[in-house]
């Protein structure tokens, strides 16, 4: 038979999109949907094979606080609420408003939400280069299974969590703590099955864990065992590994982190199985496909959210989302976790200007990488808030693309009214 010889050439995507979303975490998905809902031609680019980012590929669970302390009035709504309802309707949670979810159901829910709006999806595609002129991004390059592909667009949304698009474009950013650039630790989330919760005693386990640490039998720098009940009753969700002092945007550091975290996971497995009542028969069943990153690059925006804004519940005129979660800093340099709560029956706001890179004309940040201080990020980074910090920039991007304006010149009052019309809170 004749040999079929092929010579590789990358595929071409010739279209110019109104809105190009890079990163398919919750912020990216909400951004893509909200831009498409406004009638834009939208593409979303994601390095993994599913949407959800930390919530799925990172096995992060559950949604943290989405209501005010005290009154429990909702703080995060809009597409975030729709997602919770979709997960419930698929059987992935036990109530339409539950903050607990099974991530496999979330993946399907997100696929369906994206498909409903005819958004072009590129999975297994990683942003690797950005062409920019006078603050305007012209084209991005993505590394895909079909080679390096160029994508053009009018407005670009950076929803990569790490602000990859802004950094690769050469826009200034901050990294970690102001004094030493150290970031909150990376954590590998994982799961145990066959857990007998009736025998598990949290106080006793933490006492024993601390003793093992003092004796040098446990190397993990975390101060206690952070575990959660999962919606499947025999399963324990673990958020307890911790590497400190490594830079999540340095490929050598990230590679080292992945292996150190896996060793910590295995250390925890042996500790639990050999010493903890209720865990004698536990099985280590899964770990996340990548180390979880709490903090990395933050854009330098038109304004910066500070801890004073969070704790003082600042109400910005250009607010596009709300938050009520505490400042929750896992120590960037060792053991310990710092908490500072915001007042009861109140919330802070997120100004649109914090999403706009100072140096850019057609780029909006969505999700974790918006312009905050290290301390303020420790509140806004949770998933209910990053979801809302995706919906708003999607609408703003559609307004900029349709009016051919700079993102900074979007009519903010109109943006705010559109967010509210879709059930969001500003
Ligand atoms: C260990 C850990 C525990 C946490 N615990 C909780 C919790 O219990 N509850 C809670 O609410 N929040 C928690 N958080 C915070 C929360 O999970 C994240 O801050 C939030 O999910 C960030 O959302 P995002 O959409 O901005 O980014 P991400 O979820 O990180 O999404 C970014 C997406 O972009 C993709 N991407 C990145 N770079 C590129 C690129 N170059 N090209 C293409 N795609 C790219 C990624 O694959 C990902 O899908 C935790 C975080 C961590 C790390």
Image (cartoon, grey):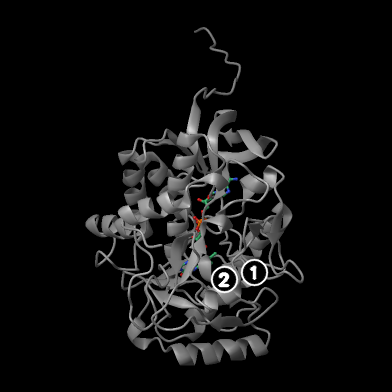
The image quadrant that residue 188 belongs to is: bottom right
Do labels 1 and 2 touch, CB within 8 Å?
Answer: yes
Asked whether 136 or 198 is in front, the reply is: 136
Residue extending furthest top?
A: 2
Identified at 25% across, 60% down, the residue is 88
Looking at the picture, tell me which residue is in the foreground, 185 or 316. 316
Left or right: 196, with 47 as reference point: left
51 relative position to 177: left or right: left
* Residue 334 percent across, percent down from the top left: 68, 78
Give the number of the disc on residue 378. 2
Q: Position of residue 305 (x, y in %)?
A: 59, 66
In the rendered image, the quadrant that contains the C terminus is bottom left
- Above or below: residue 141 compared with residue 29: above
Q: Residues within 10 Å of mark 2 (few under 14, many from 20)?
A: many
- The answer to whether residue 59 is visible is no
Question: What kind of element bears circle 1?
Answer: helix
- Residue 314, which numbered label? none
Would residue 217 be found to the left or right of residue 289 on screen?
A: right
377 to the left or right of 38 = right
Give me the residue at 64% from left, 67% from top: 373
- Would you say residue 200 is visible in this rendering? yes
Which residue carries the number 1 mark? 374
User: Which element is circle 2 on?
Assistant: helix
Residue 320 pos. (x, y %): 45, 58
Q: Local crowd at mark 1 within 10 Å, few (<14), some, or many (≥20)?
A: many
- Considering only vertical position in the picture, is 214 above or below 111? below
Residue drawn at x 46%, y 77% as measured from the top left:
227
Q: Gap between marks 1 and 2, in whole Å?
A: 7 Å
């Amino acid at each position: 038979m004749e040999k079929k010889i092929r010579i590789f050439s990358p595929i071409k995507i010739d279209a110019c999109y109104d809105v190009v979303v890079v990163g398919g975490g919750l912020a990216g998905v909400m951004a893509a949907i909200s831009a498409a809902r406004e009638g834009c031609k939208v593409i979303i680019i994601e390095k993994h094979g599913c949407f959800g980012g930390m919530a799925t590929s990172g096995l992060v669970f559950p949604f943290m606080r989405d209501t005010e302390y005290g009154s429990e009035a909702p703080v995060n709504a809009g597409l975030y609420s729709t997602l919770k309802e979709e997960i419930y309707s698929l059987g992935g949670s036990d109530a339409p408003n539950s903050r607990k979810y099974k991530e496999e159901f979330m993946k399907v829910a997100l696929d369906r939400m994206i498909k409903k709006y005819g958004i072009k999806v590129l999975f297994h595609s990683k942003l690797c280069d950005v062409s920019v002129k006078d603050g305007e991004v012209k084209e991005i390059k993505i590394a895909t299974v079909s080679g390096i592909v160029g994508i053009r667009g009018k407005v670009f949304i950076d929803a990569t969590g790490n602000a990859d698009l802004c950094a690769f474009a050469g826009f200034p950013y901050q990294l970690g703590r102001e004094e030493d650039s150290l970031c909150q630790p990376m954590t590998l989330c994982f799961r145990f099955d066959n857990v007998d919760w009736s025998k598990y005693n949290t106080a006793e386990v933490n006492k024993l864990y601390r003793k093992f640490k003092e004796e040098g039998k446990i190397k993990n720098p975390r101060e206690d065992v952070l575990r959660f009940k999962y919606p499947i009753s025999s399963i324990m969700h673990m958020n307890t590994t911790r590497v400190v002092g490594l830079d999540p945007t340095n490929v050598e550091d990230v590679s080292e982190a992945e292996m150190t975290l896996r060793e910590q996971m295995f250390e925890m497995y042996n500790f639990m199985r050999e010493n903890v009542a209720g865990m004698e028969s536990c099985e280590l069943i899964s770990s996340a496909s990548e180390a979880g990153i709490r903090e990395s690059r933050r854009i330098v925006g038109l304004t910066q959210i500070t801890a004073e804004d969070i704790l003082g519940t600042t109400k910005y005129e250009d607010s596009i989302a709300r938050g009520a979660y505490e400042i929750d800093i896992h120590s960037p340099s060792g053991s310990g976790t710092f908490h500072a709560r915001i007042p009861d029956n109140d919330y802070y706001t997120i100004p649109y200007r914090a999403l706009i890179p100072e140096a850019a004309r057609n780029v909006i940040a969505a999700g974790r990488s918006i312009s905050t201080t290290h301390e303020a990020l420790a509140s806004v980074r949770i998933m209910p808030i990053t979801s809302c910090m995706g919906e708003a920039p999607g609408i703003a991007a559609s307004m900029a693309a349709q009016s051919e304006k700079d993102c900074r010149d979007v009519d903010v009052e109109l943006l705010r009214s559109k967010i509210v019309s879709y059930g969001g809170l500003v």
